[in-house]
Image: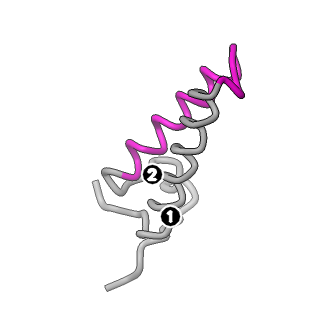
């Protein structure tokens, strides 16, 4: 699995996940929306930690700088 996410992409995903977590914790979001966004936040954190986004593959995208 070749990394295809740059550091800025990873930071943005982590920040979005944190915002979703705060909204859920403060009960600003609830119900089905909260569950869907929590799942999305989990995916964002996971992909950020491994540096790979499977959705980038079919489109040939990469935010990682070429070495």
Residue 37 coordinates in the image, percent (x, y): 62, 31
Q: Secondary structure at mark 2?
A: loop
Q: Residues within 10 Å of mark 1 (few under 14, many from 20)?
A: some
**Mark 1 to mark 2: distance in Å?**
10 Å
Residue 51 lies left or right of residue 35; in this view the side is left
Closer to us: 4 or 16: 16
Judged from this view, the residue extending furthest toward the front is: 26
Look at the image and say whether residue 34 sits in the magenta stretch: yes
Which residue is painted at 31% across and 51% down in the image? 50
- Find out whether residue 43 is within the magenta segment: yes
* Mark 2: few/some/many CA within 10 Å (<14, 14-19, 20+): some
View extreme (top): residue:
31
Task: Please name the residue shown 57% across and 37% down the image.
Answer: 22
Quarter placement of the C terminus: bottom left
The relative height of residue 42 versus residue 35 in the rendered view (above or below) is: below
Q: Are marks 1 and 2 in contact (CB under 8 Å)?
A: yes
Q: Quadrant of residue 33?
A: top right
Mark sitting on residue 53? 2
Answer with left or right where residue 6 lies relative to residue 19: left
Mark 1 lies on a secondary structure that is helix
- Residue drawn at (40%, 47%) of the image: 47
Q: What residue is shown with label 1? A: 9
Check the image and report above or below for 12 versus 24: below
Q: Position of residue 38 (x, y in %)?
A: 55, 28
Q: Main secondary structure of the magenta part?
A: helix
Q: Which residues are magenta?
A: 27-48
The earlier-in-sequence mark between 1 and 2 is 1
Q: Nearer the viewer, residue 3 or 58?
A: 3
Picture coordinates of residue 48 (x, y %)?
Answer: 40, 52
At x 40%, y 63%, the residue is: 4
Q: Nearer the viewer, mark 1 or mark 2?
A: 1
Q: Position of residue 7 (x, y in %)?
A: 41, 69
């Amino acid at each position: 699995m070749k990394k295809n996410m740059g550091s800025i992409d990873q930071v943005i995903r982590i920040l979005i996940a944190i915002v979703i977590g705060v909204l859920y914790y403060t009960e600003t979001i609830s119900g089905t929306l909260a569950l869907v966004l929590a799942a999305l936040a989990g995916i964002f954190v996971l992909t950020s930690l491994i540096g790979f986004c499977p959705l980038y593959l079919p489109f040939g995208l990469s935010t990682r700088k070429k070495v």
